[in-house]
Image (cartoon, coloured by chain):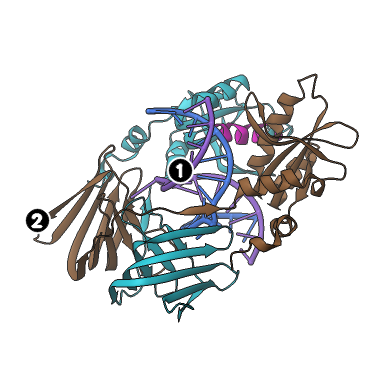
Chain colours: A brown, B cyan, C blue, D purple
Amino acid sequence: MRLVVARCQVDYAGRLTAHLPLATRVIMVKSDGSVLIHSDGGSYKPLNWMSPPCTLREGVADDGVTEWTVSATKTDDTLRIRIEEVLHDSAHDLGVDPGLQKDGVEKHLQELLAEHTTTLGDGLSLVRREYMTAIGPVDLLCRDAAGAAVAVEIKRQGGIDGVEQLTRYLELMNRDPKLRPVRGIFAAQDIKPQARTLATDRGIECVLVDYDALRGIDDPSLRLF
Amino acid sequence: MRLVVARCQVDYAGRLTAHLPLATRVIMVKSDGSVLIHSDGGSYKPLNWMSPPCTLREGVADDGVTEWTVSATKTDDTLRIRIEEVLHDSAHDLGVDPGLQKDGVEKHLQELLAEHTTTLGDGLSLVRREYMTAIGPVDLLCRDAAGAAVAVEIKRQGGIDGVEQLTRYLELMNRDPKLRPVRGIFAAQDIKPQARTLATDRGIECVLVDYDALRGIDDPSLRLF
DNA sequence: AAGTGGATCTCGCTA
DNA sequence: TAGCGAGGTCCACTT
C-alpha cells in the first residue's frame, strides 16, 4: 500500500470520460495495482479510480511533468495522473486482510419473518422458506387461516422491482392447480409510494415490517453494544 | 485529511452489524469527520466506513487500548475502531476539490439517438425526448413513416427491468386515444437474451446501438486521446 | 463464466 | 426535500 498526497490532474477514459482539474488529493495505490483518488470530503467513493486487475506505469509527460498511467488488464480503460507536486509519499506493508464479517440484512429479515409469520397477517402459517419456482425462489410460501396459499416477497427497500418480481411469481404459481389460488404479500421495512400503488392495483397486499421490533421479539439480548 | 496506518479491530453497528478482526489497515479521516477503512486490495469500496455527517471521538477502552468512536449525526450508526498499534499518522491540508467533470453515459446515448432516430428504424422521426407519462418519462417518443407513435426505451445494458419499464409505459400510452396505437422499441448497447425473449414475446422490437459509431457520426473529433 | 439481486449502496436529477 | 433511476456501480451467490 502506497499513500501519496499530491497536487495532480486526472483523466479517465473508458466507459465514460472524466476529468479532474488540478488540485491536492490523496492517491492510494494498493498492492494489486489498483488506484484510488480521494478528495477531503464526499463519501467512501473515490473521485476517480482504477479497479484491479490493472498495471501502473510511472512516466514523464512531454512537458517534463511526472505522469502515471494506470491501464486495466482486460479492457482499454485508462487513468492518467499528472503529478505536479508531491507533498507526501509513503509505503506500508499491510499483509492480507482477514476480511469483513457481516450479519443481518435481507436474509436475517427473512428468517425473522419466517418465524413470526403472524406479523404479516393473522392466521398465517409458514409452508416453506425459499419456495422454488421455475423462475426462482419465492421468499416465503404461507397458508392463511382458510388454507389458501400466500406468496410473500421480502425487501428492505420496497420498490417497483420487488412488486414486479412478486407479480411474476404469482402469475406462475397461479398456473399450478395444487397451489391456486395464490395471493401475494409485499413485505418491506419501507415501501415507496409508486410501488404501493402498483401493488395495490394488482391486488397485492403491502405490509410494513419493523426490523428492530422483530429482532426484539426474537432475542432482545442480541444487541451488539 | 488524516492518514493513519494501524493494527486495528473494527466494529460497525447500524443498518447491519459487521466486524473486522485485528489486522493492519489504512484509516482515512476526512475533514468532514467521515472515516474510511481500507485494506491493501479489493475495489474502491472500503472494508468499513462512516459517511458524513458524523463525529469522531478519540478515547481509551477499559483495557487501556486506544479506541475511536465514530457516530453518525442523524442515525445511531456507530463505528468503533480499536487501535492496537500506530504505524503511521500524518495530516494534510487538501483544500476544496473542484470536482469531477463527467461525460458520456446513458444521457449522452439518449441525446445521440434523439438526433439520429433513423438508426432506430427507417422513417422514424422524433416527437419528444423525455416524454412525460403518469408513471414517468419515456426516453424517446417518435413517429414512424406511417405516422404511428413509437415509444423508445434506451439502456446501456438491456436487461429484463428495461423491458418491464417499457411495457408499463406502453400499457399506459395505449390507453391514450391521441397516441394509440403505440409500439415499442428497446434500444441498448447490449441486450441480454432473457430480455430479448421477453421483449419479442410482447411485440417489442429490439435494436442494438453502437455507441462509438453514433459518436463518430455526431463528431469524430471528440475523442479524448 | 455468466446471470441475478442486494447494497451501511452513492450520485444526480426533478417534481 | 423526497423520490426515482443510473452507476466506470461493487458484491456475493447461483446456474
Question: What residue is shown with label 2?
Answer: A62
Foreground pick, A51 / A105: A105
Report helix, strand or loop for mark 2.
Answer: loop
Chain part drawn in magenta: B160-172
Kindly identify the amino acid type of the residue bearing the numbered disc 2.
Answer: Asp
Relative vertical location of residue A112 with respect to residue B146 in this rendering, above or below: below
Task: Say yes or no: labels 1 and 2 on the same chain.
Answer: no
Judge from the rendering whether residue B225 lies leftward or rightward of residue A160; answer left or right. left
Give how far across and how far down residue A157 sits, in percent. Answer: 64, 50
- Closer-to-camera residue (B63/B87): B63
Q: Position of residue A100 (x, y in %)?
A: 45, 54
Q: Main secondary structure of the magenta part?
A: helix
Report the residue at 22% width, 57% height from top.
A81
Q: Is residue B216 magenta?
A: no
Residue type highlighted by circle 1: Glu
Lateral position of residue A59 relative to residue B187, left or right:
left
Q: Above or below — where is B127 with respect to B13?
A: above
